[in-house]
Image: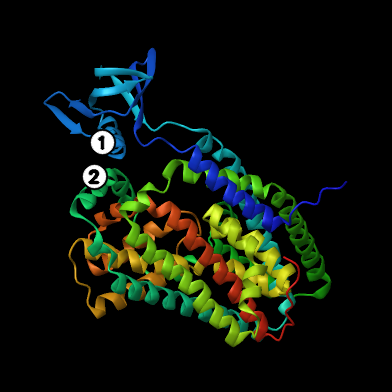
Amino acid sequence: MKIKLPKLHNQILIALIAGTLFGTFFHVDQNLLVVTYGSTKSLNSIHIKDWEKIQLVVSDNESVDTLSYNQNSQLEILSVSKKVLKDKKGISLIAAHSYVDGELYQLKEVSEIRKIEKEKTIATSIKWLGDIFIRLLNMIAIPLVLSSLIVGAASLGDIRKFARIGGRTILFYISTTAFAIIIGLVIANVFQPGNQMPADTKDRLMSVYQEDIAEKVQTQFDFDLTKEIVNVIPRNPFDAMANSNMLQIVFFAVAIGIVLTVINKSKAEPVIAFFDGLSDVMIKMVDYVMIIAPLGVFALIAATIGEFGFEILGTLIWYAIAVIFGLGLQMFGVYGLILKLFTKLNPLQFFRSIRRIQTIGFSTSSSAATLPVTMEVCNENIGISKSITSFVLPLGATINMDGTALYQGVAAVFIAQVFGFELNLTQQLTIVFTAVLASIGTAPVPGVGIIMLIIILRSVGIPQEGIALILGVDRILDMCRTVVNVTGDAVAATVIATSEKENLEFKSA
């Protein structure tokens, strides 16, 4: 009897659920510390668990400080010890009434500490399988974008057609991004999640993530529109490809495609045939990579849930609810309405046809890594031509960040509310304008939303240190907002294809 396996999107969905359960079961113990101590020649490691009280004795050549922590303070201890060891200071630990390697101690002292960290579980240890999956997708993305975009631009033939499609695409992305940020601001003002946070929770989160936010602020950059426009043109196309600078790659590929339409046909055809063949090879490679998609998704979700868990959501529940509600409204409300008005397609059937895009986007938290899958699904499941997908989708993966923009609107107002800042209408409009511009010049990779948020907070004078309040749930919400980002890309390609009179037809997902 031949066993019939579920379709790929169902396999991925099963892997998503299984990974969540696996990560929940094999989660990192929030009341356990792994302490490495001793001389460089003789290092030892012990596990301290369920302590009643812990003291960290920090010393340097001038002073000795003693810091005390109660139960459920793992994150604070990890944060402080990381900073102390980074500053080359000595640190000792005294644990009262705790289990050390399974044995109960009334008092346990550990000196010459080299490192304090979380435990590693089987759920976090398998993350490398997911990393391989992401790297394979990223490996395909650049040659696929380059080859398909060259062929797509060359196939348009008429420069007026190219200008029309390009103008509509950019207008669509800017409009939906602005709409998303406005939704985020409205929801944050209605829900007022910042006013729900207790003062002690605020102090705890600021303490835990102060080291992380210091690193993030150091990587900030000033947004300059003219500079970003200039940076679209690559000095070295190979450097742009090596650094995955998608806007520069798009510019270079489009330039080649346009020139191929005006040079001698006998010389253009071999070049077009080469890149057309390369595009087909990359698309076929996507099929092979997707064979391991369920395993990659399982590993990524299990590692994320295993390390971060759902406990942190308890302290930021209103903030998380506001973000997720806004993302749902953008995806099902705004995109559903756009599909109904501009394509006459059934929105529910559309969302079913792109399930694979959404699950991959959720598990990888990267529009760039999802791009090869997005291009394949839009072409095969919806029937959008390669000339449209090869231009609209790579551009969308770079400048279309509706989910990220919406989250930034909620986050900015949330941080302002926690610190007691009243944002007037002008300041909130500044957030809209800055978020739209900032989304154009940032890379489509995990965690980039935090860097964009720093720019937005600076533009309206909100303390940048407030980002520490939301770092704990950023990874989980990053997964959710990436789903909206990649969905917006697919919607844009569908709308543009419809405007070009393409006959779209849903096929088996």
Callout 1: SS: helix
Residue 276 versus residue 69: which sits nearer the camera?
69
User: Residue 90: in sight, yes or no?
Assistant: yes
CA gap between label 2 and label 1 equals 8 Å
Callout 2: SS: helix
Query: Residue sitting at 34 percent across and 51 percent down?
Result: 216
Query: Residue sitting at 17 percent across and 25 percent down?
Result: 60
Q: Which residue is mark 2?
A: 207
Please report contact status of discs 2 and 1: CB closer than 8 Å, yes or no: yes
Inspect the image, locate mark 1, and give the three-letter code of the amino acid beneath it. Val
**What mark, if any, has residue 80 been given in the picture?**
1
**x, y (%) of residue 93?**
24, 23
User: Viewed as shown, does residue 506 lie left or right of 105?
Assistant: right
Q: Quadrant of the C terminus?
A: bottom right
Around disc 1, counting alpha carbons within 10 Å, would you say few (fewer than 14), some (14 to 19), or many (20 or more)? many
Query: Residue sitting at 69 percent across and 74 percent down?
Result: 153
User: Viewed as shown, does residue 147 lie left or right of 59?
Assistant: right
Q: Which residue in the rendered view is the most extreme toward the right?
A: 1
